[in-house]
Image (cartoon, rainbow, N blue to C red):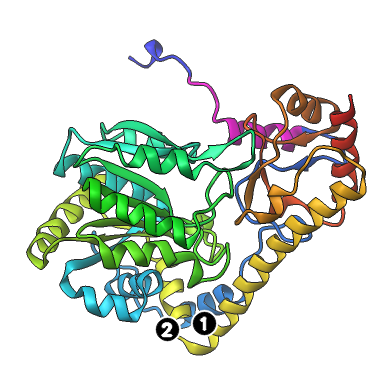
């Protein structure tokens, strides 16, 4: 039976990572990888996470299952982080949160739930969006369309085109939005633009579905959920998938959640049974370790302060790197305008170079980035920035 199978093409980002590892050039630079890197090129474990793990090692008394919907205290902790105390209280039993195996597990669980609610619905995704959105959501049989989002010529958000499209979305469809730190563009909605999106959702009666993978990585822990909270307090229904991979550095621990806001407490109770059944059918029970860490950090004042300071350092470093990169490009007398990079948020931005130039950067200079020109700003550091700038200058001049 297996002999009839045909190989699939490699994932472009994972394939790029493999090529980078095999490259013997000592000056090689990996701008394609999707994890945070510190000044030394490492993805460190946060101090608050380590301290929480040490505490759990001493105190944890069982490795029994935690149930399909996860640890209740973790679920409430995530709901409080995403929605805030005031909104959490006002929503009451119209809101439910369940633990998932990372943001990806949350997206797939949400997709199965959506398919149960309305198998004929269409999910509208931004152009561009994260490369794994369609495979994850499409695996549940959902259909897709797209709305304009990023203007590659002006290197900016095409909000006029986006809003015009949203005002044509049929009733009953879903619109997938990035909560903050848009991946791959780094171009985020302003508070005023979030309000207009909210108004379009009310007018068209579509359901909003938010992927919140980078809370705290853009402007701040509270600022990054302005749009989420605005929609949560304004709309009858909302789906939010959140992840602790980036803001806690828990990439391999698969720690996420789905938060659902329903029109009524009765609808929320029904939805909870469907989500629990979907979780049971997909992976049975979510992993506990990452969730236990987050729960302990967020509910222990000393650990929370350490974590908050660490997260601030990560965010501030990324924003400093954006400014430094643009300044150094200007100082190198490169004519092409890269100022847009300084104004974007999160780890990612488009570099705005052509596929042929990307090919040269990879093959001649061992500077690795995907064909869309998306780069991970956090991969830039003091030891590689000069080589990166000089290489880019030569490629752009040729």
Can you tell which quarter of the image residue 132 is in?
top left
Q: Nearer the viewer, residue 232 or 24?
A: 232
Estimate the x, y position of residue 242 in percent, counting from the top left.
Answer: 40, 59
Q: Is residue 222 magenta?
A: no
**Side of 370 relative to 39 (left or right):** left
The quadrant the C terminus occupies is top right
- The residue furthest left is 266
Identify the residue shown where x is 33% and y is 70%.
79
Task: Decide if residue 298 is on the left or right side of residue 305.
Answer: left
Q: Nearer the viewer, residue 39 or 193?
A: 193
Contact between labelled residues 1 and 2, with CB atoms less than 8 Å apart: yes
Report helix, strand or loop for mark 1: helix
The answer to whether one can see residue 186 in this image is yes
> What residue sits 34% from the left and 68% below the top?
63
Q: Any mark on residue 299, and which?
A: 2
**What residue does disc 1 label?**
304
Residue 194, picture quadrant: bottom left
In the depicted structure, whether residue 129 falls above or below residue 298? above
In this rendering, position of residue 315 left or right of residue 225? right
Q: Position of residue 191 (x, y in %)?
A: 46, 62
Q: Using the image, determine if residue 369 lies above or below residue 40.
A: above
Asked if the stretch drawn in magenta spans residue 19, the answer is yes
- The residues colored magenta run 8-22
Residue 207 is left or right of residue 130, and the answer is left
User: Residue at coordinates 70% horizontally, 35% vertically from top-left?
Assistant: 352
Q: Is residue 358 above or below residue 86?
A: above
Q: In the current view of this chain or complex, which residue is farthest to the top? A: 4
């Amino acid at each position: 039976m297996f002999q009839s199978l045909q190989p699939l093409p490699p994932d472009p980002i994972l394939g790029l990572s493999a090529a980078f590892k095999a490259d013997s050039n000592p000056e090689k630079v990996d701008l394609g990888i999707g994890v945070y890197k510190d000044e030394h090129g490492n993805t460190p474990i946060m101090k608050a996470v380590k301290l929480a793990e040490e505490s759990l090692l001493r105190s944890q008394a069982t490795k029994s299952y935690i149930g399909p919907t996860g640890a209740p205290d973790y679920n409430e902790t995530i709901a409080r982080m995403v929605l805030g105390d005031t909104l959490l209280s006002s929503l009451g039993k119209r809101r439910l949160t369940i633990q998932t195996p990372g943001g990806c597990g949350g997206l797939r669980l949400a997709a199965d739930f959506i398919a149960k609610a309305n198998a004929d619905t269409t999910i509208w995704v931004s152009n561009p969006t994260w490369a794994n959105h369609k495979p994850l959501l499409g695996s549940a049989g959902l259909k897709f369309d797209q709305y304009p989002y990023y203007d590659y010529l002006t290197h900016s958000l095409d909000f006029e085109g986006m809003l015009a499209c949203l005002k044509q979305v049929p009733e009953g469809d879903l619109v997938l939005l990035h909560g903050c730190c848009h991946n791959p563009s780094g171009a985020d909605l302003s508070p005023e633009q979030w309000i207009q999106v909210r108004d379009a959702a009310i007018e068209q009666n579509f359901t909003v579905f938010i992927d919140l993978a980078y809370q705290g990585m853009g402007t701040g822990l509270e600022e990054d959920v302005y749009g989420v909270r605005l929609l949560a307090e304004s709309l009858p229904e909302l789906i939010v998938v959140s992840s602790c991979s980036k803001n806690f550095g828990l990439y391999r621990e698969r720690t996420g959640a789905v938060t659902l806001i329903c029109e009524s407490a009765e609808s929320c109770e029904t939805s909870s049974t469907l989500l629990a059944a979907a979780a049971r059918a997909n992976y049975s029970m979510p992993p506990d370790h990452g969730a236990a860490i987050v729960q302990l950090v967020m509910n222990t004042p000393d650990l929370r302060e350490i974590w908050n300071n660490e997260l601030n350092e990560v965010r501030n470093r990324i924003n400093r790197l954006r400014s430094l990169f643009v300044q150094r490009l200007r100082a190198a007398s490169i004519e092409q305008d890269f100022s847009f990079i300084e104004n974007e948020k999160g780890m990612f931005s488009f570099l705005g170079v052509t596929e042929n130039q990307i090919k040269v950067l990879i093959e001649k200079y061992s500077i690795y980035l995907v064909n869309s020109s998306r780069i991970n700003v956090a991969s830039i550091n003091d030891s590689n920035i000069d080589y990166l700038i000089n290489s880019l200058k030569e490629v752009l001049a040729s």
